Image: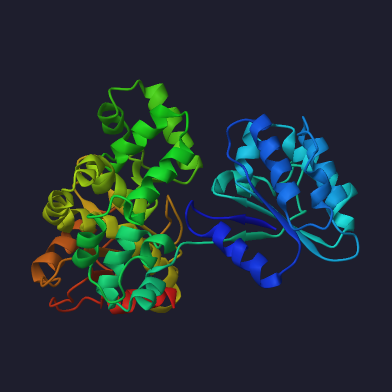
């Protein structure tokens, strides 16, 4: 079984719980990614300390020099007449530090492990690499069942914290659905209550999860980390990202963006319309990391000095404008999930539209396909403010923007998505209560 999911989403905890409930003999090895020699030594030590029946006899063994030898030791420790479990965590580290690892594992699996009553679980946080492990041409092709462990979605956040839908979306934007953060969020507490508590503790999951994620993802790639920080601070275009990252040359920016998008940390969005466009924009894909890079990461020294109150003030000042943009990809995801029930027939893609000058900039565009549509099925606007519903002025602005969208005309349906409801007449609208049903 190949298990993948974002870092700190709870993959290892899930497997640990599974091991405890089964009570079967097992070995659980977590790679550290330092070097092949260190991980081979760590694997041998875990094997000797495991609950496998033959594990004790490996305590005096010298660490093997290759993964082929190490996996042969493993095969010799597994029972032949009873079930057992082998877990290799942080699998991408092993693949990166030793190109021969995949081949060695495949050989051991085919010759020995596949003939034993053993469950082999491979875990990784590098989503792209974990997907590639089971693709054509790779040693493990068609040998494993894939499993994705996603973060909690907005509906699950609402249920876990006992929050109304609008507040649950706020909690989702801050936590990204990461269980470690939500576990320390008091049930029923609002956004500002939780932040006031978390920002007083430098060891809170809200603070440390971001640091640990970046340390694990970018141990040596300083430029990619700098580019990620520039996007986290709000830069969205190629040119502005390079400028904010220290005037990097275009080649360096391009390589960093390719790395970040390959690791699914950054999403590259293109305008959705019936015309091709080069106006690609970049955003942090994970809601939690987007919030952390915007507010928490730069303020950690302040929090460690005991002045989390200052950071809270900064967040309050920028919250409305930051949230208004951060919620848009979440809403598009909800609309895509609701497409069969609430949107015009033929809506198979949901995106946005913009030009270089942002005139117009349209929050929601529905179409039959992306990024270049044959037919525009929907044009919409998001207004995510407390006590300010979508009104007639917002409707007039949306109608004007529709006339500027390639592929849309006066008959293209309109849609309003509003946190506080809609007072404009003649336009369908969705509220947080309706949007959250997309995940139920």
Q: Quadrant of the N terminus?
A: bottom right
Q: Quadrant of the C terminus?
A: bottom left
Camera-nearest residue between 129 and 357: 129
> In this picture, is 182 found above or below 5?
below
Tell me if residue 220 can be seen: yes
The answer to which quarter of the image holds residue 118 is bottom right
Tell me if residue 234 can be seen: no
Q: How is the image coloured?
A: rainbow
Camera-nearest residue between 401 and 49: 49
Camera-nearest residue between 302 and 367: 302
Residue in the picture at 25% in, 30% down: 244
Camera-nearest residue between 127 and 19: 19
Q: Report x, y in % for residue 159.
A: 38, 78
Query: Is 76 displayed left or right of 65 in the figure?
Result: right
Q: Report x, y in % for residue 146.
A: 66, 58
Residue in the picture at 75% in, 47% down: 48
Q: Report x, y in % for residue 299.
A: 22, 43
Q: Report x, y in % for residue 434.
A: 32, 78
């Amino acid at each position: 079984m190949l298990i993948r999911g974002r870092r700190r989403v709870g993959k290892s905890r899930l497997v640990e719980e599974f091991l405890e409930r089964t009570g079967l003999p097992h070995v659980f090895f977590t790679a550290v990614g330092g070097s092949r020699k260190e991980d081979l030594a760590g694997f041998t030590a875990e094997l000797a300390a495991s609950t496998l029946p033959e594990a004790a006899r490996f305590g005096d063994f010298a660490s093997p020099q290759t993964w082929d030898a190490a996996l042969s030791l493993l095969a010799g420790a597994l029972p032949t007449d009873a079930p057992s479990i082998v877990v290799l965590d942080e699998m991408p580290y092993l693949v990166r530090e030793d190109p021969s690892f995949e081949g060695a594992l495949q050989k051991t699996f085919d010759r020995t492990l596949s003939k034993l009553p053993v469950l082999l679980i491979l875990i990784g946080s590098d989503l792209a690499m974990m997907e590639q492990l089971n693709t054509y041409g790779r040693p493990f092709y068609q040998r494993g069942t894939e499993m994705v462990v996603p973060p909690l979605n907005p509906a699950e956040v609402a249920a876990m914290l006992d929050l109304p839908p609008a507040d649950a979306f706020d909690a989702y934007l801050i936590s990204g659905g990461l269980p470690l953060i939500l576990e320390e969020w008091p049930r029923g507490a609002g956004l500002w209550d939780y932040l006031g508590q978390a920002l007083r503790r430098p060891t809170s999951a809200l603070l440390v999860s971001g640091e640990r994620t970046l340390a694990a993802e970018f141990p040596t790639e300083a430029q990619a980390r700098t580019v990620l920080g520039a996007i986290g601070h709000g830069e969205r275009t190629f040119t502005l990202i390079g400028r904010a990252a220290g005037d990097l040359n275009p080649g360096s920016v391009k390589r960093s963006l390719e790395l970040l998008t390959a690791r699914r940390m950054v999403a590259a969005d293109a305008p959705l319309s019936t015309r091709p466009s080069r106006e690609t924009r970049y955003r942090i894909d994970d809601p939690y990391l987007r919030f952390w890079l915007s507010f928490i990461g730069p303020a950690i020294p302040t929090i460690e000095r005991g002045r989390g109150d200052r950071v809270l003030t900064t967040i309050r000042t920028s919250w409305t404008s930051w949230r208004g943009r951060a919620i848009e990809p979440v809403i598009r995801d909800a609309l895509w999930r609701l497409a069969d029930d609430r949107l015009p027939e033929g809506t198979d893609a949901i995106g946005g539209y913009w030009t270089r000058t942002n005139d117009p900039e349209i929050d929601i565009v529905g179409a039959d396909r992306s990024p270049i549509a044959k037919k525009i099925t929907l044009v919409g606007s998001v207004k995510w403010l407390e006590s300010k519903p979508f009104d007639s002025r917002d409707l007039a602005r949306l109608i004007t923007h529709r006339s500027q969208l390639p592929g849309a005309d006066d008959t293209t349906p309109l849609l309003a998505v509003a946190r506080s409801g809609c007072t404009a007449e003649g336009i369908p609208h969705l509220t947080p209560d309706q949007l959250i049903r997309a995940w139920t």
